[in-house]
Image (cartoon, helix red, strand yellow):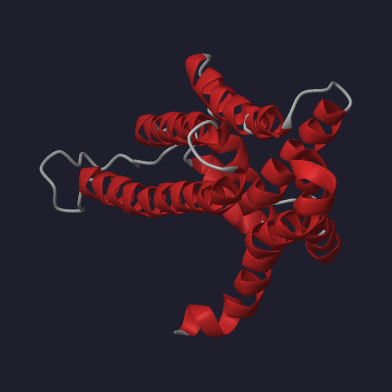
């Protein structure tokens, strides 16, 4: 209940801008101007929402980045021809590329989750950033960042592929309903998994720390450099 009191209004506006209004606009515009133009018109609310969020917080969150990338690619695709379904299909390309970028960063040993997490800590305080960076050379910390990056990369990529497959299985109207549910559901599942895995990793790290009376404690200072 506390979360809904603090974030309920913003969440409701986000759902309205990114889910309800695009569907309503498509249904109103498509009979007179066709599916392709209706889809282009339905992009207006997400654009406005992303710009308002950026102006309010002076940063673009992950959802806004995905929305803006999808809109930008779709607008470019409008000049390249094709029908409405190909336009919808191309909207999933940025999400798939982001998933591949996560997986690629893990493959070269520079997990993107670390970069994103560090940016979050830097916005909070210099003390939290210092505490975060003290752990970066820990094997447990590096393993946690790597696993999180792989899971997020795979999750985002699979979500994009599944959404692309639905383009040819559903009507445009139904796709506009199902695709956001799939997207929000995937992000929610990944966020919940991240919280669970982070707590599990921290508990495991704490369990590995020697106690003051531990037989293996030879009096040396144990710390993560």
Identify the residue shown where x is 62% and y is 65%: 15
Q: Is residue 184 above or below residue 221?
A: below
Identify the residue shown where x is 58% and y is 56%: 128
User: In front here: 153 or 141?
Assistant: 153
In the rendering, at what x and y percent does residue 6 appear?
58, 81
Q: Is residue 214 above or below residue 55?
A: above
Identify the residue shown where x is 49% and y is 49%: 187
Q: Is residue 64 above or below residue 6?
A: above
Asked whether residue 107 appears in the rendered view, the answer is yes
Identify the residue shown where x is 78% and y is 34%: 74
Residue furthest to the left: 215
Asked whether residue 59 appears in the rendered view, the answer is no
User: In front here: 200 or 103?
Assistant: 103
Label tally: 0
In the rendering, at what x and y percent does residue 69 appear?
75, 37
User: In front here: 133 or 47?
Assistant: 47
Q: Is residue 80 left or right of residue 175?
A: right
Residue furthest to the top: 108
User: In front here: 140 or 11?
Assistant: 11
Q: Is residue 214 left or right of residue 221?
A: left
Q: Is residue 161 left or right of residue 64?
A: left
Residue furthest to the right: 79
**Quarter the N terminus occupies:** bottom left
In the rendering, at what x and y percent does residue 138 appear?
41, 33
In the rendering, at what x and y percent does residue 126 appear?
67, 55
Q: Is residue 202 left or right of residue 4?
A: left
């Amino acid at each position: 209940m506390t979360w809904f009191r603090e974030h309920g209004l913003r969440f409701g506006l986000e759902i309205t801008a990114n889910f309800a209004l695009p569907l309503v606009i498509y249904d109103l515009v498509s009979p007179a101007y066709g599916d392709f133009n209706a889809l282009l018109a339905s992009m207006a609310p997400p654009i406005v929402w992303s710009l308002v969020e950026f102006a309010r917080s002076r940063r673009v969150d992950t959802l806004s980045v995905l929305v803006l990338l999808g809109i930008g690619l779709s607008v470019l695709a409008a000049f390249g021809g094709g029908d409405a379904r190909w336009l919808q299909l191309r909207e999933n390309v940025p999400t798939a590329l982001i998933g591949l970028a996560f997986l690629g960063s893990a493959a070269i040993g520079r997990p993107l989750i670390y970069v994103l997490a560090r940016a979050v800590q830097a916005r909070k305080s210099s003390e939290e950033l210092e505490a975060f960076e003290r752990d970066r050379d820990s094997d447990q910390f590096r393993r946690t960042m790597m696993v999180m990056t792989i899971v997020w990369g795979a999750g985002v990529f699979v979500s994009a592929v599944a959404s692309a497959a639905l383009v040819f299985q559903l009507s445009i109207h139904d796709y506009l309903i199902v695709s956001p549910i799939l997207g929000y559901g995937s992000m929610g599942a990944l966020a919940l998994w991240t919280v669970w895995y982070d707590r599990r990793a921290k508990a495991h790290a704490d369990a590995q720390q020697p106690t003051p009376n531990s037989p293996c404690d030879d009096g040396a200072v144990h710390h993560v450099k």
